[in-house]
Amino acid sequence: MSVPLPLIHSPLKPGQQQIHLDPRAYDRGLVCVHCGLCLPACPTYTETLQESDSPRGRIQIMLGLTDGAIDMTPGIQNHLDLCLDCRACETACPSGVIYHELIEDFRHHNPSPNEITLQGRLMRWIFFNIFTHRSRLKWAVLPARLMQKTGIYALLRKTGLFKLLPQRLAKMEQMLPAHGRLWPRELPEFLHARRLDDSADQSNASTSPQPNSRPIKRVGFFVGCVGSVMYDEVNRKAVELLAAAGCDVVTDARQVCCGAIHNHNGATPTAHQLARHNIDTFLPLSGPQVDLIATNIAGCGAMLREYDFLFRDDPAYAQRAKDFASRVRDISEVLLEVGLPPMNHPIEQTVTYHDACHLAHAQKVTNAPRQLLAMIPGIKIKPLYECDMCCGAAGTYNLTQPEMATELAERKLKYIGQTKAGICAAGNVGCAMHIQSEADRRGQPIDVVHPVDLLHQAVFGPGK
Ligand code: SF4
Ligand code: SF4
């Protein structure tokens, strides 16, 4: 049971909108000393050059609205809606303002009226009822995949018919990866898929980790919803790399969505429900537990790492959530820790690396993927200017704010182009889908891949 806290709200003037904020989130804003060091790190500020589209400006807006000093208007709402929640401002801030707690709590208590439009409601329904359910998403994508395989999809794209769709649906269509399995593999088809409460003896001896001098880590693999449907091959490769590195990998099919989409779109009770389910799956009260929980999706990893924050007011789950969050790692951290298998297949390619916001700014993971990529024989790494500036994907942002998302992708692609690299690695499926789809639309030749793709190729060979 969560302990209800009093919310700060403004003394209402006639006709004024009631604004609520958790006092702890309000206090986050008070830490801001207005130095402005976050401004050049903020993607929306660097695009519009408006103070109200900067972290400092938004903090003052949220505090002012809560104090009742300013009124909510459609213009002010747009400045808040335009925030990507990318958390680059947190990395830049010398005062330690934890901005995301402020904006997320504000959005939770004060949903944007822009989301109450018919298109907004349809998008929310799709986010909550399709995107976050692996099996439903597979069915939803199947017709498009069938058309892709038969060539009908390419023909339809050429006719420009998809451009007649409402803007957000058109953007969704544009993001469908060009390649993918007709029917993505379910978890039990993975090499090491099994439930956590299966006896370890039942695992197939031929797929068990190789004995070595290090203690074997039991790694729970978190597959993600969109990731496991759009990029199921990346999940398979990640599991194979972990197993080859000597881990005992468990990909328990009872796991559910991490809850990030719900949490960032004001559906916090559902996020709690999903999080409880995942905690019970990976850390059952009786029976074996996992040592680490690995994922190759930065957005999911960031959310899983924040389960302790999510349950801070829930005495029944607070400690278990803290325990769960302390075990979450990005795949790159686990592979670096356990040690990669020998890489006998050189990759003679020039590669650049884009930092996914939820990896670099939320999880503070920047070195591990670079270190792993640098170990691949033959590879040439080219640094990317503004490598940790958001590409515009930001979860569902590219669907709800397509104009800003496209501007940011174009900027990212400009700098990727300057590296002359043929491959851009990014540790988040959302970034990969967004950057690749915008590159394809512009006709810019670049392959956006997950670092796991390259590591797997270096270990097992191309096409494996
Ligand atoms: S979260 Fe990102 S977009 Fe929002 S204010 Fe911070 S830097 Fe700007
Ligand atoms: S860097 Fe931090 S303290 Fe400075 S203006 Fe931005 S949020 Fe405020």
Image (cartoon, grey):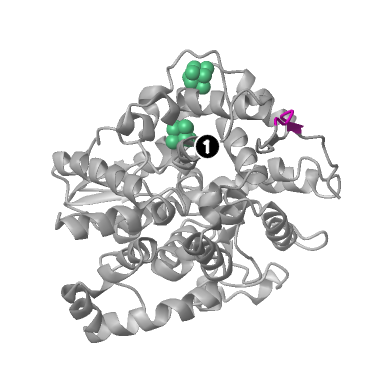
* Residue 117 visible, this angle: yes
With 86 as the anchor, is 202 left or right in this view?
right
The residue shown at (44%, 16%) is: 36
Residue 386, how many percent across, how many down?
Answer: 29, 33
Residue 150, how many percent across, how many down?
Answer: 24, 87
Classify mark 1: helix, strand or loop: loop
The residue shown at (30%, 42%) is: 408
Residue 49 to residue 259: above or below: above
> Closer to the camera, 145 or 242?
145
Residue 31 to residue 387: above or below: above
Give the magenta part as a residue range.
8-13
Q: Which residue is mark 1?
A: 73
With 213 as the anchor, is 147 left or right in this view?
left
Residue 93, how many percent across, how many down?
Answer: 49, 21
With 327 as the anchor, is 451 left or right in this view?
left
> Closer to the camera, 459 or 301?
301
Q: Name the chief secondary structure element in magenta.
A: loop
Density class for disc 1 (Cα within 10 Å; few <14, some 14-19, many ≥20) is: few
